[in-house]
Image (spheres, grey):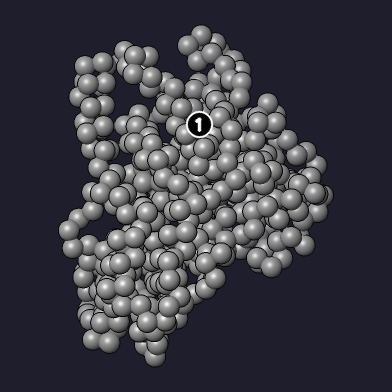
Amino acid sequence: MGVDNPSVDRETCLSFDRQDPLAWLREEFALPEGVIYLDGNSLGALPKQTVPRLNEVIAREWGNGLIRSWNAAQWMEAPARIGDKIARLIGAKAGEVIVADSTSVNLFKLLAGALRVQPGRHFILTETSNFPTDLYIAQGLVEMLGGNHVVRPVERAEIERSLDGSVAVLMLTHVDYATGEVHDMRRITAAARKVGALMLWDLSHSAGAVPIDLNAAGVDLAVGCGYKYLNGGPGAPAYLFVAEGLQDAMQSPLSGWMGHAAPFEFEPEYRPAPGITRLLAGSPPILSMLALEVAIDLWLRVDQQEARRKSMALGDLFIQQVDETCRDLGVEVVGPRDAAHRGSQVSLRHKEGYRVMRALIDRGIIGDFRTPDLMRFGFAPLYTRYVDVFDAVHGLREVVTSRAWDRPEYKTRLAVT
Ligand SMILES: *Cc1c(COP(=O)(O)O)cnc(C)c1O
């Protein structure tokens, strides 16, 4: 779409929406009236089909089926079945992805498994600005292992030259949560493998935002989040990926019965299940799993290249409108201006970013805030319209010029920003 045209007006945005090949998808989501939702990168919107599906699962499968549903309603297969569906979205094979736990817990399992298969290598190499939970989990694991390993966070520019034979695993987040900057997955994965390090990608801000091909890039391990662009619901289960060739060597430190070769044999000794199933620990949260499945089924109907094209165009439009209308307002675009290097989000810096975002949210323009001064706007391509982007930037201008943010109640930070 011609969003690089310097004078895009509201009418033009409406015409972009009319021509949008993904416009039909917005109807698939239950979005509240009067809200411009630009936080689907943090909590995806509710797919309409999730409501009847969960009602059915609760009333029929749980209510009537009771324990029989573990077999009759294929509850037991849900983690692997939904994993296979997610595999199709991230360039993995069936049997390489499973849905389980949270991203944090999956990081713990995969990092611990990775260190076991890399004896003599002491470093978990990562990036200083990685998402905090990724760093915290690595720190906790290393501490538990009693001092034989070290977490080594380096600046982005230092990552590749810090790779050598002492690195057990390189753990990176593909799309930076704060700036939206995208790592070159192929190049970095190849560099890690060249020195014999395992490559672990966190796809939390990638799946549903940028096309991913884990197998083509030769990735060993990956984790990702179900509740952001994938729209699985608040606290939705996460997923993990282990390349086929690595699965037999991987052992989970959380050797629970769901990852046992024969859970219903009730053997006293742990024996890992073959394949990806060994990465399960305990019983899957069926209600959340099946809500996630509705969202993934919807994603499987979407042309991902088309979604990427739209997300790039929405981000470009946003930046162009900010440049045009918010110049001289102390608002600065952070992170890549080139859509090819950007995920599906744009961050703006403003010294009163927190209060400006609170004022925007009170006007129904929902983004979020990341410390110290970043306002984050996500452009989930399945339900964000071009006109939403236009209206959001004009709302931002109004909030900043009218000082609507300068209210005492916005001084106190809420628990979730
Ligand atoms: C959102 C996100 C997480 C979330 O972890 P949870 O354990 O699901 O809370 C982890 N890593 C990254 C990079 C994220 O963006």
The residue at the point 31 percent across, 70 percent down is: 13
Where does residue 216 sit, x and y in percent of width and height? 66, 44
How many numbered callouts? 1
Q: Quadrant of the C terminus?
A: bottom left
In-front residue for pair 396/103: 396
Q: Please tell me how crowded label 1 is: few (under 14), some (14-19), or many (20+) other residues with Cα within 10 Å.
A: some
Rendering quarter of residue 240: top right
In-front residue for pair 209/165: 209
The residue at the point 63 percent across, 46 percent down is: 200
Rendering quarter of residue 331: bottom left
Where does residue 144 sit, x and y in percent of width and height? 62, 42
Where does residue 163 sit, x and y in percent of width and height? 77, 56
Q: Quadrant of the N terminus?
A: bottom left
Q: Is residue 45 left or right of residue 314?
A: left
The residue at the point 60 percent across, 49 percent down is: 201
Report whether residue 272 is seen. Answer: no
The residue at the point 54 percent across, 13 percent down is: 262
Disc 1 C-beta below 8 A from ligand 1: no
Report helix, strand or loop for mark 1: helix
Three-letter code for the amino acid on which mark 1 is drawn: Asp
Q: Is residue 123 left or right of residue 16?
A: right
Return the residue at label 1: 84
In-front residue for pair 83/139: 83
Report whether residue 259 is seen. Answer: yes
Rendering quarter of residue 365: bottom left
Residue 206, above or below 287: below
